[in-house]
Amino acid sequence: MATSSTNSSKTVREAELYAPIKAYLQRQGYTVKGEVGAADIVAMRESQDPVVVELKVGFSLALFHQGIARLAVTDQVYVAVPHKAGKPFARALKDNVALARRVGLGVMTVRLRDGHVDVHADPEPYRPRKSKKKKAQLLRAFDRLKGDPNEGGATRHGIVTGYRQDALRCARFLAVHGPSPGRTVKEWAEVPDATRIMRDDHYGWFEKVERGVYALSDAGKRGLADYGDVEE
């Protein structure tokens, strides 16, 4: 949960948000009352569904819990906090608006010095946009992993990626066969990106012997010992 800490919340009371939000809603033709049942603010306009606003001096999990609970009464639920200056609050606002959208809540902020109310999101059902690119990346990462090396969470080495597994297969091949051309490692170790992996050498496991030919470094030998329990 993102939060904002630009100003101390101890100097602000939830009650200070009430009057500006009430005035804002009244300008739109609502009849507004505070502390109605469990709700901080309830606004009614003709025969429309009620609007509920939950107040807090800053973003918190409790604020979102309250807002979600009010969705059992109406779809028109907002959470409201004081607007603060500075980049930390701006980042927190962006993150929390994104979260609010995902749970169907609206977001308001109140500028306490003059009572200005901003509506950053209105309540509406969340319809996430699917990313074909991200889905393809996920499926490639799934297919690249051999076995389930991270079963039960990270290994003692941390998360084992498909890239790490490929580097380990290259290192094992070199440990057995000695310095070898990348094309040979690619074919026999069944690592399509063998040459690039050994050339980039992210882990310091490989040494270039000559153009296109690589050997296992001392760090690579230690890496094989450290990752000896990782499935090929």
Image (cartoon, rainbow, N blue to C red):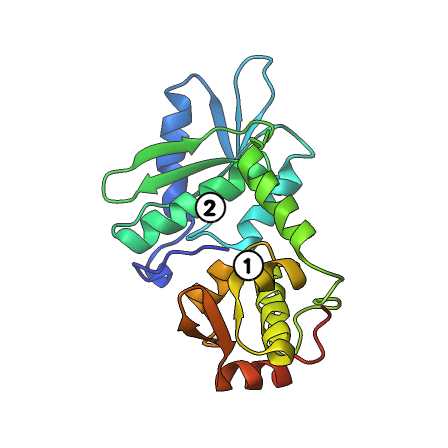
The residue at 68%/80% (across/down) is 228
Residue 32 numbered tag? none
Residue 184: x percent and y percent?
59, 62
Question: Is residue 10 positioned above or below 179 on the image?
Answer: above
| Label 1 residue SS | helix
| Label 2 residue SS | helix
Residue 107: x percent and y percent?
45, 37
Question: Is residue 165 positioned above or below 155 on the image?
Answer: above
Q: Earlier in the sequence, mark 2 or mark 1?
A: 2
Is residue 81 in view? no
Residue 226: x percent and y percent?
62, 84
The residue tagged 1 is: 183
Question: Mark 1 and mark 2 in contact (Cβ < 8 Å)?
Answer: no
Question: Is residue 161 positioned above or below 227 on the image?
Answer: above
Residue type indicated by callout 2: Asn
Residue type indicated by callout 1: Arg
The residue at 35%/55% (across/down) is 12
Residue 32: x percent and y percent?
48, 28
How far apart marks 2 and 1 lie (CA) works out to: 50 Å
Residue 11: image quadrant is bottom left
The foreground one among 123 and 139 is: 139
The residue at 56%/86% (across/down) is 222
The foreground one among 18 and 172 is: 172
Question: Is residue 175 positioned above or below 189 on the image?
Answer: below
Residue 227: image quadrant is bottom right
